[in-house]
Amino acid sequence: MSSITEIIRKEIENLSTDSTRTNIGTITTLADGVARVDGLSKVMYNEMIEFPNNVLGIALNLEENSVGCVLLGDVSSLKEGDEARTTGKLLSVPVGKELLGRVVDAVGRPMDGKGAINSEKTLPVERIAPGIIPRKSVDQPLQTGIMAVDSMVPIGRGQRELIIGDRSTGKTTIAIDTIINQAKINKQGEKSGDPNFRAVYCIYVAVGQKNANVARTIKTLEESGAMEYVTIVSAPAADNPANQYLAPYAGCAMGEWYMENGMDALIVYDDLSKHAVAYRQISLILKRPSGREAYPGDVFYLHSRLLERSARLNEESGNGSLTALPIIETQMGDVSGYIPTNVISITDGQIFLETDLFNKGIRPAVSVGLSVSRVGSAAQIKAYKKVAGKVKLELAQFRELAAFSQFESDLDATTKASLDRGARIVELFKQTASNPISVEVQTAIMWAMQNDFFDSISVDDVNRATQSLREYMETQGKDACELIYSTGKLEEETEQKLRTAVEDWKRTFS
Amino acid sequence: MSTNLNNLVRQLVKRSTSEEGIIEQSLVEEVLAGLREIRPARYLEILKQYLIEIRKSLRVQVVEVELGCQPNELLVSKLRSKIESIGSGSLDLNVTRNDNLVAGYRIRIVDDVFEDSIQSRLAKLSHSLTT
């Protein structure tokens, strides 16, 4: 009892009793989550504005006669003539490890019912991206645990790799699997006690999604034990467009904190198509001039300034990184849409998912021809690079030959061999959701494929054989895998161990 | 809002302002009568913009003073001289009593509000205890 009164007494003692000076204005119009305010002559761009009943807004349009504010709360209590006042603060969100395992809204308020977030650090949601000097080339891998991705479109720490495809093609699954794999690697690294191990912390930003989908994602992450390394920023479809517009920037600020403090982080923006739609909505209500598809003129800048904040910093700047996996939904596989082309040009590559492949049961439905990673191959570990270097070309040749072979009855031996190899690689890459494979096991499987161990297995059995080999390598073949994990190379001794292990497995496989 | 309309409204506000730089009711009435007579194109738009600009100008010359106690002559004259010494020219002081303040004052000059009242201190305390 006495301690409670003591806290209040201290608060009163510390309270400033000086007269305050605030800049105020009056709401003149109020519609669709946007207030036009007369006054506020000293307001800053992006400044937080305080409205009655603890409703906050952000000043987005500074005009000659009025200020356009997007509102971030329950606007039903506001009315024309209400007073709005400046706060002198730019919109900031809590950052730090206290947010791990939590679900927050676009302004960092908890949504998971687990109590307050005890973080004393905050960062503004809008910040300038790191310049040229503190940056460094991508040189460390970020394993997704998905063989088709890690082998053909490898991702490095600090890279921006777009995941693009039609609805229901497995875009979110790739992102979630990547997060699950980071948690798996983090646990393995922490267990090993390696002082040089660098954990990857994850932020998943859900924009304009159904609450049920977000709940399912949380459940998947919890079930796989990944939630302790993840922060979820949610601005669901039912949320106002202002929150949907802000959520990616808020998530980015949370990720930047890790990067600036010498740690590695991964951020998933799911998805930026809906983010652009939310921004279009706000812009139209703010009466900004509209351009192509009614998007405002600065829709490119909307995404470029967000994705440029993901970077790999050099040693002098702390050696941290922020990797971004933005997601874009296409319509009927059209990658030439306005928003898709914008984001493709900003990012360092894309993983394109095809509906046809997905419907054929080839999952993840990664399109070999349209997927590319511009910088990731520099980050692949040597052992994996050695076994996976040719696979993209082989698969691309297979797809081309497979199309022509439909009209050809008599095929030459080389073509037949390419088709056989391709069909096996396709089966090998089939992987179920939430089932990431570690890089050393992936290396072993790829090595077995490149050394013709799968050639005697019928195509229909390749996927089963892959599962079997995976289980074998994780148990009996552990020695070879540990050697790959520790050295990162495929030396003669490692190859010998691999050969023995794979031969042993082949004898048992039926 | 077109530049022509803005220029026209600025001219109208200028005509509504006396030589001392004060918006005067008689001048405003003259302007309105003139507008009614001519009935220019975009009449309604001009009127709306004129209202916004006049409001803005009036805010500059009227200082709203709210007090937690009953205002007295001495206090008001002291306040007037203090405010006029900071600003330029003579200002209209609109002094009212606001019981919500409990004690203290709240002065609004254009968009700026200077406040030291029990109400504002309690709001500050409530904010610091809840965030």
Image: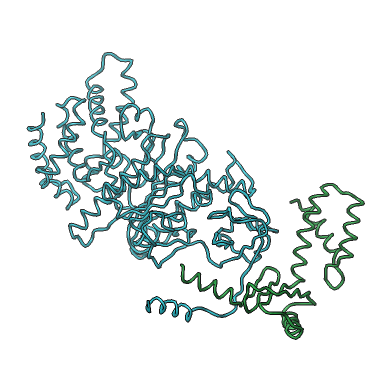
Decide if residue A70 is in sight here.
Answer: yes
Residue A456 is situated, as x and y percent measured from the top left of the image, at 14, 26
Q: Residue A9 location, x and y as percent?
A: 45, 80
Q: Residue A163, image x and y in percent?
A: 39, 41
Q: Residue at x 32, y 35 (%)?
A: A364
In the rendered view, does A270 fall on the left or right side of A502? right
Task: Give me the residue at 76% from left, 75% from top.
Answer: B93
Give the mark count.
0
Q: Residue furthest top?
A: A409
Q: Which quarter of the image is occupied by the N terminus of chain A? A: bottom left
| Chain painted green | B
Say left or right for B119 vs A197. right
Relative side of A11 to A508, left or right: right
User: Which residue is at a point 62% across and 76% down the rendered structure image?
Assistant: B102
Query: Is residue B101 or residue A145 the one in the foreground?
Result: B101
B116 versus A505 height, above or below = below
Q: Quadrant of residue B10?
A: bottom right
Residue A496's place in the image compared with A86, above or below, is above
Q: From this viewpoint, is residue A377 visible?
A: no
The image quadrant where one finds the C terminus of chain A is top left
Above or below for B29 versus A166: below
Which colour denotes chain A? cyan
Query: Which is nearer the eye, A397 or A217?
Result: A217
**Residue drawn 27% across the image and 36% down it:** A432
Q: Is residue A501 above or below residue A198?
A: above
In front: A15, or B5?
A15
Residue at the front extreme?
A1
Image location of residue A471, percent across then percent down: 15, 40
Color theme of the render: by chain
